Amino acid sequence: MEGLRVIVDISGSMSALGKHAVVGNALTTLSLLPPEFGNVQLAKHCWDGQVESLLALLQQDAGTPTLVLTDGFAFAEAERSQKKELEKAFLSWKESLFIVLCGADAVGVPALQKCGDVQSVTAENILYAAEVLSERRQKTAPENNEEEW
């Protein structure tokens, strides 16, 4: 059974302004998904804020529904070549990827605005992101597959 992969940014900026609590609340919300989501198995991964590390994590299980919890500063501080690589990766996985922006200072990070096709939500709307990923998975799942997400 496929699960829901959550990649949590643990870079330095994520330790400021109560973002640990925001991330904790988001993870609690995901662990308490309502029954209509089926038996969702969460796979949590920590990400050090380095672009190469995120790309490696995304490539491990490409196509698995994924939420990236971040304040976005790792994207904003990346070098130009890394931003292009991130943009390309985000667009190639846009059907299975949501960026979840954590913290009041995360809104409007320019690096994310260039990836207009990649959906992002603020942490308080993480349930919406899970719903959309679940619906997308159901649309692409083979009809003979009786497993729920």
Image (cartoon, grey):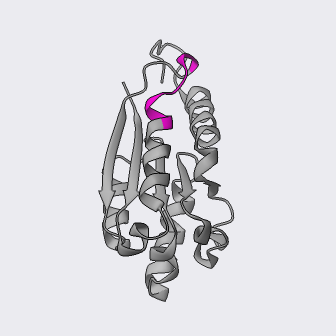
As rendered, which of 49 and 141 lies closer to the eye? Answer: 49
Image quarter hosting the N terminus? top left
Residues shaded magenta: 29-36
- Determine the image quadrant of residue 12: bottom left
Count of numbered tags: 0
Indicate the position of residue 70 as horizontal and vertical percent values.
Answer: 48, 62
Residue at the location (49% across, 87% down)?
80
> In this rendering, does residue 63 appear at all?
no
> In this rendering, does residue 97 appear at all?
yes
Indicate the position of residue 132 as horizontal and vertical percent values.
Answer: 63, 38
Magenta: main secondary structure equals helix
Above/below status of 60 relative to 40: below
Residue at the location (36% across, 64% down)?
54
As rendered, which of 129 and 104 lies closer to the eye? Answer: 104
As rendered, which of 35 and 1 lies closer to the eye? Answer: 35
As rendered, which of 131 and 89 lies closer to the eye? Answer: 131
Task: Indicate whether residue 30 is drawn in magenta.
Answer: yes
Left or right of 5? Residue 38 is: right
Task: Indicate whether residue 31 is drawn in magenta.
Answer: yes
Residue at the location (62% across, 34% down)?
131
Left or right of 50? Residue 119 is: right
Above/below status of 130 relative to 56: above
Residue at the location (49% across, 45% down)?
26
Above/below status of 29 relative to 123: above
Indicate the position of residue 55 as horizontal and vertical percent values.
Answer: 37, 64
